[in-house]
Every structure is written in structure tokens, then in C-alpha cells.
Image (cartoon, helix red, strand yellow):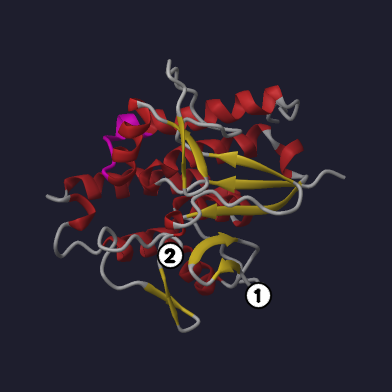
Amino acid sequence: MKHINLSFAACGFLGIYHLGAASALRRHGKKLLKDVKAFAGASAGSLVASVLLTAPEKIEECNEFTYKFAEETRRQLLGAVTPGYDFMARLRLGFYLYCLESRGQEKETKMKARDRVSVYVENPARNLHLKVLLASSFVPVYAGLKPVEYRGQKWVDGGFTNSLPILPVGRTVTISPFSGRLDISPQDEEQLGLYVNVTNQNILLSMANLVRLNQALFPPNRRKMESLYQRGFDDTTKFLLKESWFEESA
């Protein structure tokens, strides 16, 4: 039996790309998913990993929430850092309402290390589940000044130390909206072909990736967000075809 892991990279609002990937996996990747032993992710990647594992039927609801959340953030004078705008409160409420599975199964979420929160989601109780995911998504200043507390410790976004967790056993299929040496990602054409390792992501040094980095923090309009979702879906479909994991949806 194959031992496959899925890992979703940290990427802010580009998490919409991950939702496109998750949708393709659910529709055409059942052959792959049945061999997946662990789901991993950092920041927005951990949120999508959680949805795919515990509530895949809610992917479409999560899409709609992400579009609305991005639009609300765009309307703020200074985006997420606008004084008086509680970014984390909106993320908490939206994810709780639209993206969490409703059954409170009492399994504990594993956390990699004390100094980072790249989470491995199993099926924890609903509130604990949400707290750990929010801890993995807290970017100081950008998301507020008060870190999420869990088990008496304060945590910050896993993307600062390990934005793409690779598990020690089996093959980890990596997914990122940044072009680079990854299993599923956009493929930019760059003549120099220079790569840089950014907290465990091997990404291409390109203008397109710089634009994506800006979009991760300052979300584009809905039309562009929908395009990013579709790109995630299409890139994942290509990967499934290449690896002979593709199945037509019923």
C-alpha cells in the first residue's frame, strides 16, 4: 500500500488556489486520496487541508466565504491592517460557520514544534480544531497584535518557519500557488531559472511570483480570485493525469 501525504503551502489569500486544488482532488483524485495517510499545511494551507480532510462537501461554501472575505478586506483603507478592522475575528467567524465539519470528534490535533504552527489535522473537536488553525494563520501586525494562545503558549503563522511541511514517512505531494519545484503549482517561464528557498518552499525568482506575494496579503478582485481558483483546479488535474491518478467524476 502506498504512503502518500498532502501538504498545502502557506499563501495568505492565495488559499483560493488551494481550494481549487482541493476541489479537483475531490472530483478527480479519489484514487490518490484513498492512499493519503496525512494532510499537512501551514497558514492558509492548513485551513484548506482541514476542509479537504474533515468537510470536503463544504469546499464550495468555503470558496464563497473566501471571495466575500477578500472583498471585505479590499474595501478597507489599509487592507487587513486598517485600524479597527478585526481580521482574525472575521476569519474565525467565517471559518466556523462555513468551513468546519459539524461533528465534534475527540481526536487531538498534532503540532510540529513549539516555535511554529505547521499543523497536521486529524479530526479534533470543533473549537479546538478552530483554535489550532487560527494559530497557524496569525501573522503579527497584519492579522492583529494579540497572538492566538493554545495550551498556555502564544503562536504565530507557521509560514515564518516552515511554509511547506514535508512529512518524514512516505511521499509528500506538495501544493503551492507560487511557481517552483513543487508537485502542483503554476509553471512560469523564466529564462534565468533561478530558485530561492523561502521557509521550505523552493520557488522561482520571477515577477509573476512577486505579484502573487502581493496578492497573498492584498487580495485582488473577485474575477482574479476566481481565476486563481480555476488555476488551482487545472494544475491539479494536470498532475493527476501525469501521475495516472485521474478519474472521471461520477
Frontmost of labels 1 and 2 is 2
* Residue 126 in magenta stretch: no
Real-space CA distance between mark 1 and mark 2, rounded to the nearest whole angstrom:
19 Å
Q: Picture coordinates of residue 165 (x, y %)?
A: 58, 52
Q: Is residue 200 above or below residue 187?
A: below
Q: Quadrant of residue 84?
A: bottom left
Q: Which mark sits nearer the N-terminus, 1 or 2?
A: 1
Q: Quadrant of residue 213?
A: top left
Residue at 79%, 47% in the rendered image: 3
Instruction: Name the element at disc 2.
Output: helix
Q: Residue at x 31, y 29 (%)?
A: 223
| Residue at the image point whose x is 36% and y is 59% from the top | 91
| The magenta segment | 218-225
Can you give x and y, in whole percent of width and height, for residue 52 in the image? Answer: 59, 49
Mark 2 is on which residue type?
Leu
Where is mark 1, residue-wise? 106
- At horizontal 24% and vertical 49% (from top left) the residue drawn is 72
What mark, if any, has residue 134 been given in the picture?
A: 2
